[in-house]
Structures are given as structure tokens and as C-alpha cells.
Amino acid sequence: MFLRRALEMYEMVKRGSNGSSTVEVGGVCFGRGFVVIAGPCAVEDEMQIEAAARGVAAAGALMLRAGAYKPRTSPYSFQGLGAPGVTMIARAALRHRLPAVVEATAAEQLPLLARSVDMIQIGARNMQNFALIQEAARTGLPILLKRGPAATLDEVLCAAEYAVLEGNRNVVLCERGVRGFDRHTRNLLDLAGALRLKELTGLPVIIDPSHGTGQRSLVAPLVAAAAAAGLDGAIVEVHPEPARALSDGEQALDLADFAALMTRVREIAPTVKVASQACR
Ligand code: PEP
Ligand code: MN
């Protein structure tokens, strides 16, 4: 059933030069080039988000990421700044002309997000929170849908269809690793699965090597692999001072490492520039 609809989606979508449908987010075109989204795991204060946004914009990121509502495994961990954080992210994004993506963890956050940011992230833990997906889709904003930590590809497709059936076809899929059996990486980043999702739907598919590995040394090589494989982008955690990060510091790149990553990506995927323009 899901496959029938997915294939319909595949037929209906207008395809870009690399075989993807296109999804436009605040003037950035997914599906026409390699889109790098970057920023901290969580907004922590004005100075931190300003330094992060300035640094990733200067290095060539096309979008800003940051969480304000953090779905933390432990209730004792930093939970995010909430609504004031959304405003901080939105202001930094505006100052540096970067469209922003922010995760929603509950439906009541959606009105503020819809007024403030350019794309709504449905995180891995909520990939099968169908009511949240439907409400997010109804805002009309593009959706970044992350694969659940134990979701099959068919389950990802079904989740995407909940958004599409609300009349919102602006869905970008994100492979962020599934639960593996080895302790040396946080998750098992499934590059083949990401490519398969793209084949099945034609929707833009990006990777998140930060949550996918949990380790900063592995982030740049995997972004390079995704670019070389023809995927549509990556979402990368970057912190001005990773050692002081309130969440996910061990997987965050500093600004110098992120600039080096962008240089590497531009060598592999010369289409980066194309993505910086609106889809036509
Ligand atoms: C995130 O991107 O901030 C996040 C929590 O990721 P995930 O949902 O993939 O764990
Ligand atoms: Mn994180």
C-alpha cells in the first residue's frame, strides 16, 4: 500500500537534474545540489547561536540547524531553551540570511515554529508520532523527517506519506543511523538505505552523520561519501566551543573543522552552488 503511494509520489514529482524531486526551503533548493545544514545541537544562548550562525554561513552552509526543544534520553540532561530559544535561532538565521530548521517535539510548539522558522524537523524519536507529523504538515512548512532509530525503510515511507496525505509534498528524508550492535559508533548510519529511499520516492534524502556516528572524526568523511554518492545533503552539528556544549559536544565540529569539511564537499559536489538558488 505504502509502496503504491510512494511510487505515485515518484511519478508525480518534478525531477531535478540529479533525479530528485525538488523541495524549496527559504530560497534553498533541495534536490538540485548538495545542501549542507549546520549549527549546534541546541541553542544555548544568544552569543553561542550568533557565533555558530556567523561561522557556518561564512564557511558556506546553506541552512542553520539548532534545537530549542530537545528530546533527551535522560530527563536530567539539558532539555533546551524552549520558546525563547526559537526566537534566538530565528534572529540569528535572519541576521546571516540562512533559512532555519528546528525540531518540534509536540504539536503546541508548531504555531510559534511556523511563524519563526523555515522548516520543521520531525526527529527520530517522533518518526511514528503520526499526529505530530500531520499537524506539522498542515502548517505548510517543509518537513525534515528523520528515520527512527529502529525504523525500516517501509516505515519511513509510511511516515512520509502521513505528511504527503495532508497535502504537503515538501518532505526531505534524513538517514541518521539506526540502532546497531557495536558500541564504537552511536548508531549505524545506513548509506545504502538512504540511497534506496531516494530510488523509491524521488524525494530529496540527506544524512545526519553527527547523530549517525556520535563521533566528530567520522562526520566529514561521511558527508564526503554522501556527496560522492549523489545524495542531496547533510545536516551537521557545529558548535563554536564543542568542549562546552550542553548537548552532543563529542560529535560537534568546531568552526575550523566545519570550514575544512565545506572545502572538501565543494571539491566532490560542484553542484553545491546550484542548491543555493531557489528551485525553478
Ligand atoms: C537532532 O537533530 O537534534 C536530533 C535530536 O536528532 P535525532 O532525532 O536524529 O536523534
Ligand atoms: Mn544532537
Image (tube, rainbow, N blue to C red):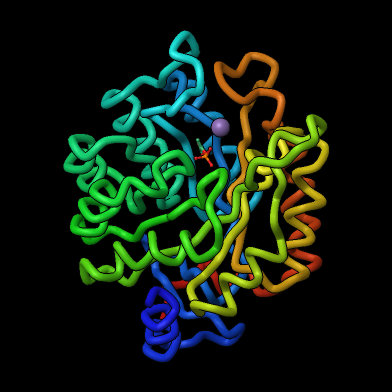
Q: Is 190 positioned to the left or the right of 73 in the image?
A: right
Residue lying furthest top: 76
Residue displayed at 42% across by 22% down: 46
Residue displayed at 71% across by 66% down: 192
Residue 279 image position (x, y, % from top left): 42, 77
Q: Is 186 positioned to the left or the right of 152 in the image?
A: right
The answer to whether residue 100 of the structure is visible from this angle is no
- Residue 79, image quadrant: top left
Query: Quarter holding the N terminus?
Result: bottom left
- Residue 89, image quadrant: top left
Residue 111 image position (x, y, % from top left): 17, 42
Nearer to us in this view, 60 or 6: 6
The answer to whether residue 195 of the structure is visible from this angle is yes
Above or below — where is 17 with respect to 196? below
Residue displayed at 50% across by 16% down: 74
Residue 254 image position (x, y, % from top left): 71, 31
